[in-house]
Amino acid sequence: MSDKTLHPICAFDIGPDGQAVLLEEPWPDAASAISDGYRWLHFDLTDPALEAWTDEKLPPVAAYALRQSETRPRCDVFEDGVLLNLRGVNLNPGNDPEDMVSLRLWVRPGLIVTARLRKLWAVDALRKAIDAGKAPVAIADFLNLLTYELSKRIERVSLDLEEETDALEEKLLGESSGLSGELVILRQSVIKLRRFVRPQCEALNDLSQWQSALLDQGHSDLLRETANRATRTIEALDAISERLTAMQDHLETRHASALGRNSYILSVAAAIFLPLGFLTGLFGINVGGMPGVDSPYGFAVVTIASCVIGVLLFVVFRLRKWL
């Protein structure tokens, strides 16, 4: 296999004392060279050699799952390991946080394989911690730290959405013009987050119940706490969604009320001008026998009569509280 070259984003052998050794093997094995340690291999899914490596080094189910183009958060336990798909918010420049990034993991004793298409800042924070000599000493610690970093950033984005919703509610109390567009964008952001955070919470709960020598009760409790944080985030997103729906209903009611008011005003105006239009139309016909045709005061009389009728109609509408 010396003619094959793989380019992992990062690769470490991590010992039980937390000391990490950077790997530079062109075709790394799927096993740690450190006794009682573990190996972490992090790949870019666009690496052309990744398919051959996974087919050679990993079980078929893991090789196929790691290379899937579309994934949803899940946790599937197999006899020789666990397959985990997670999502993290997209904090890359020029991207929307709610456009979540997928992370695929294959975990078994002595090995963690992760793969992604776009950069995940939670994974980058983990790599920097390892570079700084603060590597997780066990696979369970790695999973706890990774899921915590992912959940923390999702929670932060959820809080930002809540603040945006608060600001939108304040605007709604005043001028409502132009708020519909902001409301639609905010609702789309919440929908995208909820789409993946809910199944991710279920995946974390499943992971915390994994019966394995890799996870003791303490680590399971920490994973369960991370799942609880994800549950709280879901509840917060549900509350935001309900508030946005209420604001949308309020905007639609306000617009319908304004439309009805304008239609009413136009109807009243038409009711006032209808008899005046009839009167002017009647006197505008070009037939013989029209009164006042030969009088120099005919036009003035018709004009004054029209004004008087208009004023009388206005007074009647006001007295009947139609205006």
Image (tube, rainbow, N blue to C red):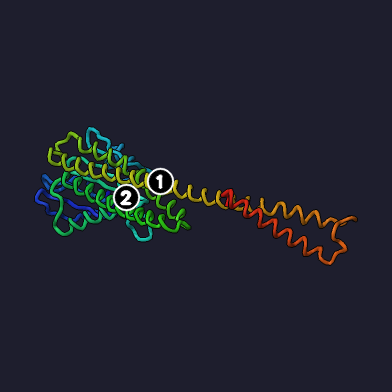
The label shown at residue 237 is none
Q: Which of marks 2 and 1 precedes in the sequence? A: 2
Residue assigned mark 1? 246
Is residue 318 in sight in this rendering? Answer: yes
For residue 283, above or below residue 215: below
Residue assigned mark 2? 116
In the image, 125 versus 271, the foreground residue is: 271
Q: How many marks?
A: 2
Quadrant in the rendering for residue 291: bottom right
Crowd band around label 2 with a 10 angstrom C-alpha radius: few (<14), some (14–19), many (20+): many
In the image, 230 versus 170, the foreground residue is: 170
- Image position of 244 (left or right of 304): left
Give amino acid for label 2: Arg
Q: For the point 12% across and 40% down, which residue is it? A: 218
Mark 1 or mark 2: which is in front?
1
Q: CA distance from mark 1 to mark 2?
A: 38 Å
Is residue 51 in sight in this rendering? Answer: no
State the image coordinates of residue 202 (x, y, percent, origin top left). Answer: 28, 38
- Image position of 176 (left or right of 112): right
State the image coordinates of residue 62 (x, y, percent, origin top left). Answer: 29, 39
State the image coordinates of residue 28 (x, y, percent, origin top left). Answer: 23, 49
Give amino acid for label 1: Ala
